[in-house]
Image (cartoon, rainbow, N blue to C red):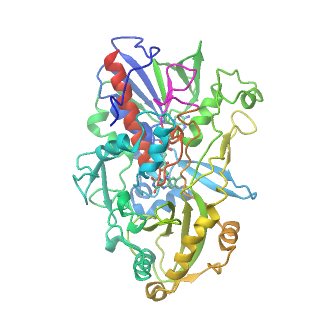
Amino acid sequence: MSGDPFPNDDPTEVRMNPQTRNIIVVGGGTAGSVLAARLSEDPGVSVTLLEAGPDHDAYDAAVLEPSRASAAWEGATPNATTPMLLENGGAIPMIQGRLLGGTSAVNGLATLRGLPPDYDAWAAAGLEGWGWDDVVSTFIAAERDCDFGSSPLHGSTGPLPVRRWRRDELSRAQRAYYDGMVEVGEPEAADINDPSQLPGLGVFPVTIDEDGKRVTTSLAYLTPEVRGRENLTIRTNAAVAKIAVADGRATGVTLDSGEQLEADEIVVAAGAIWSPMLLFRSGIGPADHLSEYGITVHADLPVGSTMSDHIGPGLPYRHDGPRGGVGGPAQTLLVGASNGTDIDYHAFPVAPVPSEDQTVFMMAVFSLRSSGRGSVRLGDTLEADPIVKVPPLPDDAPDRLRHAFDRIAKWEQSAAARELGCEALMPLDLNAADAVSTALERVTLSYGHMTSTCPMGSVLDADCRVRGVDGLRVVDASSMPTIPSGNTYLGCVMVAERVARKMAAIAREA
Ligand SMILES: Cc1cc2nc3c(=O)[nH]c(=O)nc-3n(C[C@H](O)[C@H](O)[C@H](O)COP(=O)(O)OP(=O)(O)OC[C@H]3O[C@@H](n4cnc5c(N)ncnc54)[C@H](O)[C@@H]3O)c2cc1C
């Protein structure tokens, strides 16, 4: 750890009212639930959480049953669906959870941290307090790891219950994938959150309870006890239309209903697509873009200009008979390296919805590198849906992904894959020089890991404060300066935990 990770070095950060400081959190999703819980630990602060969707008491089986996650992706759960446009003219329909718990209520439950170099690069870019040695303690503190408990890399007392799928919970395709990859010589990693065990073949850690049910961040953090706090108000079905900015300071919000609320500080946690949209509508973003819509510009910042995501090709397969197992869609995976230890892709079958006669599954191969050249922009009108462009893959990604294809080609020949009766639905010579580009033309997938649309370093400072607008922060997937080499939900929890602690430290010192 380098010195005090939470220095109070900003003289503009003052308490407007020493008795009660009113904080509004916009969005009760993955990060917003953590923020509301942590910020309201200080009785001197009054926190209002405004969530556009319904409360988590409206959760039904499609939310909590891991094996039904893909039903959520097909619309069974309240969500905002946006087409993400591909360079080749295609589009990927992308959902974001629109309910308390946000996208942690609809995602694949995978609970990975990313790798030390990801965060060391944040620190090296001048973002103090975000290096691996700083953030790993927050990852450990957030989890209650049921497999590894209290150990140098894991925690046993945090709000998030984490464990790996058991073998009897795996689908038949996932079991065959694991067994076949072992058969062809891939090294096993008991804990794929341990960087020293990578590259390797492992089982996804997931955030589920003892009964195998999903635990969203709202269930984990906004417990009945937390919700009982007098200084925390949770308002659901309360979408924020705009942030009021006057004389360089955010002063409050206007809801879709027209209701106005004042605040000393506003923390936006509406996710990587909707946080930038809210900033645009509030006059914060690229001046040329905003002026096309006649919006008064309060801060000319590159909001929505550097979106990252993990994308890659999908290879569809089928086998006879039922899917089997109860696990969620992400179960066993190969964390791969194309260059020694240069970890740069994930390959795993997306376990399909339960079925009886035959089972179709998608072998997903995701590049963990992003060009960061995706974008979010306002649509035809101020009220219209956003225009979201998927970041193109970095130029060297197809070469790197060929290593994954080589391994899948070997797996196809394994006894485990043959026993499953696995059949490619779009046959392809996986060893051909153009196999990756052909597969990408047929099926391009997104992991749903959109980040960096309001990144620390350009739009935000290292404490997630919006540059040029006092009293306003963005704390969610948007805030990440670059995308980590792993699934992004746990990173959102980590960012929210750390910024909430920084805000508490600042308030204590004021
Ligand atoms: C299909 C899919 C599968 C995924 N699978 C995984 C996985 O297995 N593992 C993993 O780590 N990551 C996964 N991810 C990514 C991960 O879930 C997200 O990166 C993370 O949850 C984003 O958290 P967030 O806090 O930024 O946004 P969200 O969790 O989306 O929260 C935003 C919240 O803001 C609310 N909101 C939006 N606009 C407004 C407004 N104007 N006013 C008030 N409230 C508003 C929304 O309703 C929502 O509750 C997946 C993503 C998708 C889409």
Q: Tell me the residue at 59%/12% (across/down).
A: 247
Residue 41 coordinates in the image, percent (x, y): 29, 29
Closest to the observer, 354 or 42: 42
Q: Is residue 225 above or below residue 105?
A: above
Residue furthest toward the right? 292
State left or right for residue 224 relative to residue 372: left
Magenta stretch encompasses residue 451: no
Q: Is residue 259 visible?
A: yes
Quarter holding residue 164: bottom left
Start-end of magenta stretch? 459-475
Quarter holding residue 459: top right
Q: How many marks?
A: 0
Image quarter in which the C terminus is found: top left
State left or right for residue 116 relative to residue 398: left
Q: Tell me the residue at 65%/81% (across/down).
A: 429
Q: Is residue 100 above or below residue 408?
A: above
Image quarter in which the N terminus is found: top left
Closest to the observer, 437 or 229: 437
State left or right for residue 232 relative to residue 432: left
Magenta stretch encompasses residue 472: yes
Residue 490 coordinates in the image, percent (x, y): 41, 48
Closest to the observer, 269 or 427: 427
Residue 368 coordinates in the image, percent (x, y): 53, 57
Q: Is residue 100 visible?
A: no
Q: Main secondary structure of the magenta part?
A: loop
Residue 186 coordinates in the image, percent (x, y): 42, 75
Q: Tell me the residue at 44%/14% (across/down).
A: 11
